[in-house]
Amino acid sequence: MYRSINVSILGIILLLLLSCTGPSTHSLSNELIEIDVKKEYPKKDIVLNDIAEITYIPLETNDSSVIHPSFEISLSTDTIITGDYFQSKLFFFNKKGDYLGGFKRCCGQSGTEYHSLNLFTVDYTQQELYVYDDFFLSYILYDFSGNFKRRIKLPKQVWLRHLYVYDDKNLIGYSKWSWHGKFDGKSDVVEENPYYFIDKQTGVMSPVPITIKKRISDDVKFRDEKTGESMLTSLYMNPMLKTKDGFIIADPSLDTVYHFVNDVLTPVTVFKNRDMEENLVDLHSVIFYSDRYLLLEVQKKEVDYARKTLVEHPNHFLFCDRETQEICEATLYISDKTSKLKIDSYDVSEIPDNMFVSLFTAGYLKWLLEQGTLKGELKKIAENLDEEANSVMMIAKFKQ
């Protein structure tokens, strides 16, 4: 049984301790980074090639492997698995991008198929995939050939935003919100324990030791008064990120970002001076986390209730060197591209040690080629790429 911790109180204690102590003498992994949201940090261009080895992987395109540009990614040391939400199909590639096969088990009523492919996670040791079926509030286990093994019904009425393999017995997931409340544009999040361990065999859910008394969501929901239809708009801030030995938990409701390893929550970053008014909130999520580097996205959430939408605010990327404790507002670049690197929101499930993954659609690369902003290997790839081809993966493996 896991003991519940009120992390809001813990965050306050950490801030007090931080203000009363001198420079940390802990190891790099235990360095606590303090982010002042109101502070203007120095602006700096970060070339990923200076701190990481860059590899491009064009995913093979043939009649059986055409993938929509938006897909979920899972990586092992030798396999790439992508999940296409629009086709509800899973595709397998090797690390060179060669297509190995795929399967689709969608839309039937037999109990062996998922309603749609929204979320999946992979156990590479057992060569099994867990596909979350949000329509039937369950998950289905398949082997890598697509053979059905079992369906497990979840005991709670939740909507999972993230799902990962935790260990040989459990999955771990984040429930964005439960099916409660009114569609009035205000938060209807009522669960105080949104992070769960999920038993692989039984589906029994038990809370991760994080209790949040007042939840903040990165989206808002409205109901159209004339049609009765619900509307959802979101900033897509990701509260979970898998690391080589655990998970980053960057809940937008909390002032502290944690690294959760072996059932222990270790603070990584503390935010201070956040706007936390009813209709103006500073949100954050972690883009990548390596042995040395941390990239955070900071975004304001403001709701225009009259227009039933979110007010547009610029987002900022804060790059933290955990060795030197340097913090800067970063613009990312790669050496094969003169324009800045776009940081888009997409789902990455499993990923090997010390890596960051991004995607370039074929259409975007062809456009960059026309603009004359590509060089080196990426330019050669774009020159030989059909505009209807699959996306090209970029893998950055950090040197430290």
Image (spheres, rainbow, N blue to C red):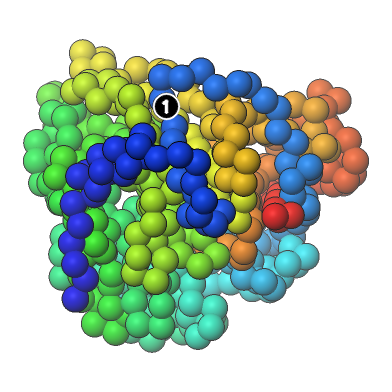
Q: Who's the residue at 69% across and 73% down the image?
A: 78
Name the side, left or right, on which 394 lies relative to 232. right
Give coordinates of residue 273: x percent, y percent: 33, 24
Q: Quadrant of the C terminus?
A: bottom right
Residue 312, percent across and down?
40, 18
The residue furthest top is 306
Classify 368 as above or below 61: above
Locate residue 340, reporting x and y percent: 70, 28
Secondary element under disc 1, as helix, strand or loop, is strand
Q: Nearer the viewer, residue 109 or 365?
A: 365
| Residue at image location 24% in from the left, 82% down from the top | 202
Q: Is residue 133 above or below residue 51?
A: below
Mark 1: which amino acid? Asp
The answer to which quarter of the image holds residue 362 is top right
Q: Nearer the viewer, residue 394 or 216?
A: 216
Name the foreground residue: 249 vs 377. Answer: 249
- Total number of numbered discs in the rendering: 1
User: In the visual, does 181 lie left or right of 96?
Assistant: left
Q: Nearest the camera: 257 or 281?
A: 257
Figure check: 348 above or below 324: below
Q: Which residue is mark 1?
A: 36
Residue neighbourhood size for the residue with mark 1, other residues' Cα within 10 Å, grouped as few (<14), some (14–19), many (≥20): few
Residue 154, position in %: x, y? 21, 70
Residue positioned 16% across, 40% down in the render: 214
Q: Residue at x 57, y 32 (%)?
A: 327
Q: Is residue 23 left or right of residue 377?
A: left
Q: Looking at the figure, which quarter contains the N terminus?
A: bottom left
**Residue 308 visible (yes or no):** no
Residue 237 position (above or below residue 204): above
Residue 73 in view, yes or no: yes
> Farthest residue in the left direction?
181
